[in-house]
Amino acid sequence: MLGGTLWQDVVAAAATHGLTALHGSAGDVAVAGYVLGGGLSFYGRQHGLAVNAVTAVELVTPDGRLVRASAEEEPELFWAVRGSGGSLGVVVAVEIALLPYADVVAGMLLWDRERAPEVLPAWLAWTRSAPESATTSLRVMSFPPLPELPPFLAGRDVVVVDGAVLEDDDRAAELLAPLRALAPEIDTFGRVPAPAVLEVHMDPPGPVPAVTAHSVLGELDEAAVAAFLEQVGPGTRSGLMIAELRHLGGAIARPAVGGGALSHVPGSYALHPVAIAPTPQAAVAGRAAAFALLRAMAPWAQVNLLPTFTDTRADTSRFFDGEDWARLCRVRDVVDPRRVMQAKHDL
Ligand SMILES: Cc1cc2nc3c(=O)[nH]c(=O)nc-3n(C[C@H](O)[C@H](O)[C@H](O)COP(=O)(O)OP(=O)(O)OC[C@H]3O[C@@H](n4cnc5c(N)ncnc54)[C@H](O)[C@@H]3O)c2cc1C
């Protein structure tokens, strides 16, 4: 697909062939930025980071050449560009391998936030034994009373578990049973056409001004649950719209055979608080709220970070294993010695 192509268009086109892709939670995210920064999908625990599905990239290098990089052509550049973000050139085309799913079991479970002290530890316990076929997220979400929101969200504080389970209907129901036993107010899990997986996370259909923070967490114990709930649990007013824990592990955590500079993310959960920031003042307050949650969860944080969840300036060596980081920097010195490229995350 071409440089600016959005996931919603790729997923719709793949669906006509009974296929889908390792897209993220939102249809209006572009394929290039997502895959160049790893790409965490609801198919990820089974199939790994989306960047590993890239089979070729065409990019305009800082010296103005149009180059095709694949396992056979410019293999070192192909290795480096898979994880480099925008640091090695402007990507004008990406080729990706697709997934053989026309439909999947996906959806969401919703409770009032008052239930978070039960739901959070239950979901964490569930994730510890969930098979790699299940990739889910838990979010505590707080919504203003806006008329454009659906009534089950407007003005409410809720806890939501959503994602996909790549199993047949009976096995998926068996796996989801412990979560359903918590009697969610809403349960939309069921077999849906693959493009509907872009809807389960209820991301806004277009860009929304927001500030975020991110860390990768290891295993979460009772103290971690208490720390999380102290920030965003019942009775709190954190200022965050979303406090997300995305389940990692499985193929996401394993280095991919033949992978590039970034092929895996070790860790158990990706923490991703989000605050809506319609004004500069709101952005300052939102950032403070997001980093307050990060600080509270710091005892469980790892050093590594996932680029696509990192919106603030970061030490980009934290995206890579040490040797891969050094090799990537060497490639960059050759490809862009004058530092022409100004990427979101400067290597
Ligand atoms: C609503 C929403 C939901 C999301 N859900 C997920 C998710 O489920 N999983 C996940 O992993 N991430 C998710 N993200 C994060 C998303 O993957 C990153 O923000 C990603 O950087 C977006 O890429 P983009 O191309 O759309 O954005 P852009 O802002 O256009 O790109 C971000 C950066 O990527 C680089 N880049 C983009 N295009 C090119 C190109 N053609 N050539 C070279 N460099 C390029 C540039 O450095 C650019 O600054 C989500 C983001 C949003 C807003």
Image (cartoon, rainbow, N blue to C red):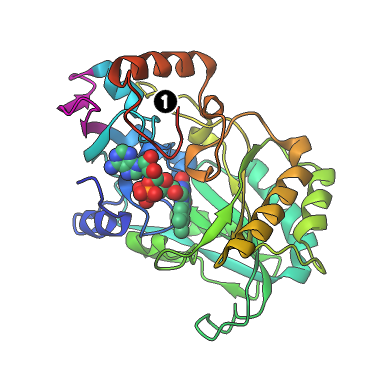
Task: Residue 71: say if magenta.
Answer: yes
Nearer to us in this view, 11 or 208: 208
User: Vertical placement of 52 versus 214: above or below?
Assistant: above
Q: Which residue is drawn at the image coordinates 47% and 24% (left, top)?
A: 255
| Residue type indicated by callout 1 | Ala
Q: As drawn, is 15 to the left or to the right of 321?
A: left
Nearer to us in this view, 293 or 10: 293
Q: Disc 1 designates what residue?
A: 256
Q: As drawn, is 215 to the left or to the right of 327?
A: right
Q: Categorize mark 1 by other alpha carbons within 10 Å: few (<14), some (14-19), many (20+).
A: some
Q: Which residue is drawn at the image coordinates 60% and 59% (left, top)?
A: 283
Q: Which residues are magenta?
A: 55-74
Give residue 232's position: percent from left, percent from top: 75, 60
User: Vertical placement of 192 versus 227: above or below?
Assistant: below
User: Vertical placement of 151 versus 328: above or below?
Assistant: below
* Res. 49 image quadrant: top left
